[in-house]
């Protein structure tokens, strides 16, 4: 028969190359064929699927919760600013359970907003999913996205509901995660470098050429870093700090997850990253640990938005509602993504960072999510920091 697990809605059966959900009454079966998953997802999840039953359970919960919907035969076009395995799992699970074809493109959140702006007169995208909340707020302000109040909104944490209200319900929080540092334990030991514990540590001369960060022009992660430092230090002191940090940066990557992946693989010793991206790399066997600065840090509120003028509006709303369910949100941890989910009923993986143990600043999402403020700070960074020699 194969390995199986039982949910309140039915039976989940794993057969070679296939995951099958059968509803409790036996009226409906949904099959998830792993041969049809993307290469990225297969390579990332192969070992996890064989060894960790929570992947089966998470996929089954998502399938079971969606099994009551009729197949529509429509499609939805999504820009996903999350990590590739998570994006792929979401696309495959939603498509198989809902019968709605998913056309998905992966882009950094900054690049996603640029695409939405370019397509404003003739939108080709229905959903902007994931990535830091600031670009979603910018998109809302620029009227690139449209109001939608999901019936699941009351089930979300206050910070997610506040994100929605702040945008005029043109976006919603789907997860949150703190900013910090990743470090390669083997490289740190080999080079006899101390583990950085504060923002001030990163500008010490011993870290010259040892740090990777993302570029704020394309990455929401890097913009969150700038906004965090401005709120922590004051703007002028923050940019003085960033100019000093610039001298220690080996590479600025386009995407926020790029630096921590590079550090995990020994291409650099330290990254400035969201710390929830670390446990997934460690689970794959890489010598990676994460830490949050003891002098304070900010956090992202990863968000989701429906594009104004979406060609497939009903399918977009169906995806939006589905993505806020506990089953869909559990797919994050199942694909080694360890943000804090926004639905209160989602089971939280123990590897998700515990915000209660982190010194968090009172991040002003309203101010730093404004397009003019974001543009101004990035332009100042380009002029006063990136334009300087290292």
Image: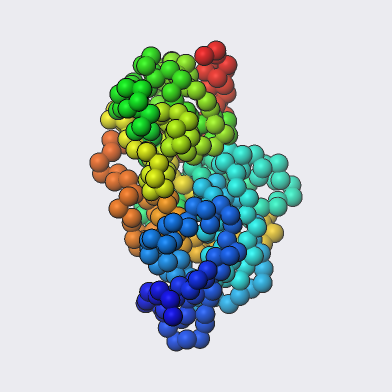
Residue drawn at x 57%, y 61% is: 37
Percent from the top left, x then y, of residue 301?
43, 45
Percent from the top left, x then y, of residue 259?
48, 34
Residue 300 sits in quarter:
top left
Using the rendered image of the protein, determine whether residue 186 is visible from the camera's viewpoint: yes
Percent from the top left, x then y, of residue 305?
55, 52
Tell whether 222 sits left or right of 194.
right
- In the image, is residue 274 above or below residue 62? above
Residue 239 sits in quarter:
top left
Percent from the top left, x then y, of residue 368?
47, 34
Tell whether 167 sits left or right of 349.
right
> Which one is in front, 6 or 141?
6
Using the rendered image of the protein, determine whether residue 374 is visible from the camera's viewpoint: no
- In the image, is residue 91 above or below residue 231? below
In which quadrant is the N terminus drawn? bottom left
> Which one is in front, 246 or 209?
209
Residue drawn at x 43%, y 23% is: 210
> Which one is in front, 175 or 45?
45
């Amino acid at each position: 028969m194969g390995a199986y697990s039982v949910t309140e809605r039915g039976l989940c059966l794993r057969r070679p190359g296939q995951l099958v959900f059968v509803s409790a009454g036996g009226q409906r079966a949904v099959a998830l064929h792993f041969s049809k998953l993307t290469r990225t997802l297969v390579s990332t999840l192969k070992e996890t699927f064989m060894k960790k039953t929570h992947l089966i359970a998470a996929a089954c919960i998502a399938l079971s919760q969606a099994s009551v919907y009729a197949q529509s035969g429509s499609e939805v076009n999504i820009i996903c600013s999350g990590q590739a395995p998570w994006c792929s799992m979401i696309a495959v699970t939603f498509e198989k359970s809902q019968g709605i074809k998913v056309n998905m493109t992966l882009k950094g959140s900054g690049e996603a907003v640029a695409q939405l702006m370019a397509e404003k007169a003739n939108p080709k995208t229905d959903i902007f999913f994931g990535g830091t909340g600031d670009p979603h707020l910018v998109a809302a302000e620029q009227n690139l996205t449209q109001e939608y109040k999901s019936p699941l909104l009351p089930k979300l944490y206050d910070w997610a509901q506040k994100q929605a209200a702040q945008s005029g319900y043109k976006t919603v929080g789907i997860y949150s995660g703190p900013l910090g540092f990743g470090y390669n334990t083997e490289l740190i030991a080999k080079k006899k470098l101390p583990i950085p514990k504060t923002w001030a540590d990163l500008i010490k001369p011993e870290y010259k050429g040892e740090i990777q960060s993302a570029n704020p022009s394309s990455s929401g992660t890097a913009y969150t870093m700038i906004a965090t430092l401005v709120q922590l230090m004051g703007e002028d002191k923050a940019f003085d700090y960033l100019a000093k940090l610039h001298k220690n940066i080996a590479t600025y990557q386009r995407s926020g997850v790029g630096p921590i992946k590079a550090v995990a693989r020994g291409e650099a010793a330290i990254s400035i990253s969201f710390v929830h991206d670390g446990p997934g790399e460690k689970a794959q066997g890489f010598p990676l640990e994460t830490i949050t600065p003891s002098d304070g840090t900010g956090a992202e509120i990863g968000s989701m938005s429906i594009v104004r003028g979406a060609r497939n509006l009903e399918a977009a709303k169906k995806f939006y509602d589905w993505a806020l369910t506990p089953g869909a949100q559990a797919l994050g941890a199942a694909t080694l993504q360890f943000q804090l989910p926004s639905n209160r009923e989602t089971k939280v993986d123990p590897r998700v960072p515990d915000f209660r143990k982190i010194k968090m600043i009172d991040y002003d999402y309203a101010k730093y999510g404004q397009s003019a403020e974001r543009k101004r700070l990035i332009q100042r960074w380009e002029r006063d920091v990136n334009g300087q020699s290292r």
